[in-house]
Image: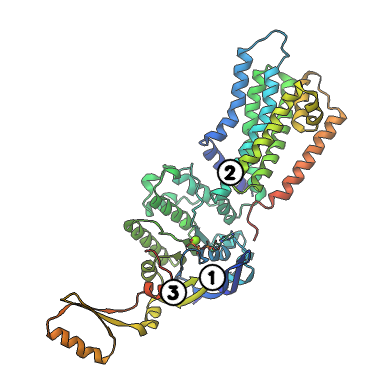
């Protein structure tokens, strides 16, 4: 597999504080990679470094083998970027925002309407950006990122603050891009989203990667703390260890017809990450 | 290069015509000239009085405030970064904007000149002076825009600069002390020039002052415009 992104020993400081702390990882071409982390973890900063908008103090990052800081116009054309603050022209219509972007690329292929249609904004093509709802603005920013048919897509919190239906729409669009063979690098604070979308995830906390792997791998790794929760009909909750002796106890409850519900608590990404960061994520 | 400049021009045409604050800057003085020149006719008032006065105010205000506001807004809304990711250089960006703003202001200046009764060769001289003035004022505004962090700081800097450029020539008519200082400002010199269009002659002190102004402004601009995009 080709490496789409390679990061080695990357560090960055804002003043005295170390926002990115000696990070190394790689993303394979065609994968969806999720960078998770609480607010202020350094996710946006990392995207800025990878996309050459910010020069890292130490270490190196490469996109398709090219140093981020040395990227030129030709290399940029392989990148689609949706930043957390969008960068759209508010007084211009959806269509004209995309048209301008295409003109800058010197691109004459007129696929704007098709792209607008794919994000469900064809009816709003003449609407000014300032009059769009939050979800529509997100989708337009996404549309602009995919307009140049990038080889790699950077999405900074593509679904934050959206209702579940719109989130679902955006997830579909992300999968459609993946099917096209695009590598996707996204950030989120939403564990459910990461579990659903990503082939690999990394948890960033205070500038360090504290976990890395596929969602299933990570959950398996933290299985040691698996417990069984039993809720009894008399309202009592019993927590049992996941081992042989517990079986007899469960049987006892069961035979006595005392069991209301019974769950095995596999750790979700969320509980793992809460344990690792000591912070609560919002979903 | 041409593609980028053209795209910027196209964008400004779509965007600024919907931006009321900037639109007002472009049309306020031409409209005022037309109104004043037709409505007011006091005996003994110098010829072209309102046209000349408003022409210099137009120079001091329109290009300066519009480009400063445009750049500051692009920074604030993060569209400038998007341009950078499309490999637009600071120079391409500014050339595109300069063409747009100076052209629009020249159209306004033509209205001012025509309303003021200039014709033929004097209208031509008038337009040349206006072109020089708008371009210099654009450079001042671009420098301010590049150096300010957001629209708030841009406005707080453009207002005093604008007052100096636009109002000092007028105030110096009434106060000699102000005149002593204001004669070193390019807009005052341009005001003196438009007031003597019929026997136009650029004296050495005028030329020296204008050149010094342009050199200082251009230097400040060159030093600052490299900071327009985030350094990698
Ligand atoms: N330009 C800057 N100057 C100084 N500090 C900065 C700058 N940009 C970011 N920081 C700091 O760096 C840290 C990481 O910021 P960053 O925006 O990368 O976080 P994030 O993970 O994207 O957070 P969020 O989930 O809220 O978007 C924060 O503590 C922030 O205050
Ligand atoms: Mg962020």
Circles 1 and 3 on the same chain: yes
Q: Which mark is residue B49?
A: none
Question: Label 3 belongs to which residue?
Answer: A200
Task: Name the secondary structure under disc 2.
Answer: helix
Task: Give the residue displayed 58% in from the left and 49% down from the top.
Answer: B75
| CB at disc 1 and ligand 1 closer than 8 Å | yes
- C-alpha span from label 1 to label 3: 18 Å
Residue B135 rendering spot, x and y as whole percentages: 70, 36
| CB at disc 3 and ligand 1 closer than 8 Å | no
Of callouts 1 and 3, the N-terminal one? 3
Circles 1 and 2 on the same chain: no
Residue B120 rendering spot, x and y as whole percentages: 72, 19
| Above or below, comparing residue B124 to residue A136 in the picture | above
Residue A50 rendering spot, x and y as whole percentages: 56, 66
Task: Give the residue displayed 77% in from the left and 33% down from the top.
Answer: B185
Indicate how the structure is coloured in the image: rainbow
Q: Quadrant of the C terminus of chain B?
A: bottom right
* Label 2 packing within 10 angstroms: few (<14), some (14-19), many (20+): many
**Chain ID at mark 2:** B
- Report the residue that reaches farthest toward the bottom: A245
Task: Name the secondary structure under disc 1.
Answer: loop
Q: Horizontally, is A279 left or right of A51 in the view?
A: left
Res A1 seen here = yes
Residue B180, image quadrant: top right
Task: Name the secondary structure under disc 3.
Answer: strand
- Report the residue that reaches farthest toward the right: B204
Question: Label 2 belongs to which residue?
Answer: B151
Question: Label 1 belongs to which residue?
Answer: A207
- C-alpha span from label 3 to label 2: 41 Å
Task: Give the residue displayed 29% in from the left and 86% down from the top.
Answer: A241
Res A67 seen here = no
């Amino acid at each position: 597999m080709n490496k789409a992104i390679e990061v080695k020993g990357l560090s960055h400081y804002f003043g005295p504080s170390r926002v990115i702390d000696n990070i190394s990882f790689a993303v394979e071409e065609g994968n969806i990679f999720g960078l998770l982390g609480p607010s202020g973890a350094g996710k946006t900063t990392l995207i800025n470094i990878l996309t050459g908008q910010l020069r890292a103090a130490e270490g190196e990052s490469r996109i398709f083998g090219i140093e981020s800081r040395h990227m030129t116009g030709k290399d940029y054309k392989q990148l689609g970027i949706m930043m957390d603050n969008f960068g759209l022209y508010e007084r211009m219509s959806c269509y004209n925002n995309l048209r301008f972007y295409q003109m800058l690329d010197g691109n004459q292929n007129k696929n704007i309407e098709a792209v607008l249609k794919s994000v469900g904004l064809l009816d709003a093509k003449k609407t000014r950006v300032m009059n769009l709802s939050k979800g529509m603005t997100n989708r337009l920013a996404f549309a602009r990122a995919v307009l140049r048919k990038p080889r790699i897509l950077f999405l900074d919190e593509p679904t934050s603050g959206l209702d579940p239906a719109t989130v679902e729409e955006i997830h579909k669009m992300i999968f459609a891009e993946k099917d096209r063979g695009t590598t996707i690098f996204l950030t989120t604070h939403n564990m459910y989203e990461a579990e659903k979308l990503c082939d690999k995830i990394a948890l960033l906390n205070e500038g360090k990667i504290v976990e890395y792997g596929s969602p299933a791998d990570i959950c398996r790794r933290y299985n040691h703390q698996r417990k069984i929760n039993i809720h009894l009909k008399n309202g009592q909750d019993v927590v049992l260890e996941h081992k042989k002796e517990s079986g007899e106890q469960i049987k006892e409850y069961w035979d006595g017809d005392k069991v209301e519900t019974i769950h095995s608590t596999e750790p979700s990404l969320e509980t793992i990450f809460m344990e690792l960061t000591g912070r609560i994520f919002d979903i | 290069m041409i593609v980028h400049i053209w795209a910027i021009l196209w964008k400004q045409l779509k965007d600024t015509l919907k931006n009321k604050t900037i639109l007002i800057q472009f049309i306020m003085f031409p409209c005022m000239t037309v109104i004043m020149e037709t409505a007011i006719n006091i005996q003994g008032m110098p010829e072209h009085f309102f046209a000349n006065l408003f022409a210099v105010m137009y120079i001091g205000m329109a290009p300066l405030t519009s480009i400063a506001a445009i750049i500051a807004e692009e920074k604030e809304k993060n569209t400038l970064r998007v341009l950078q990711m499309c490999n637009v250089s600071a120079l391409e960006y500014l050339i595109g904007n300069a063409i747009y703003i100076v052209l629009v202001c020249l159209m306004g200046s033509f209205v001012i000149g025509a309303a003021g009764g200039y014709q033929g060769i004097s209208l031509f001289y008038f337009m040349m002076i206006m072109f020089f003035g708008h371009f210099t004022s654009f450079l001042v505004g671009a420098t301010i825009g590049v150096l300010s962090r957001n629209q708030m700081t841009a406005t707080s800097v453009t207002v005093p600069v604008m007052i100096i450029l636009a109002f000092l020539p007028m105030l110096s008519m009434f106060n000699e002390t102000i005149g002593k200082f204001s004669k070193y400002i390019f807009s005052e010199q341009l005001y003196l020039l438009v007031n003597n269009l019929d026997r136009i002659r650029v004296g050495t002190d005028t030329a020296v002052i204008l050149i010094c102004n342009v050199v200082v402004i251009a230097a400040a601009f060159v030093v600052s415009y490299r900071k327009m995009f985030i350094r990698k």
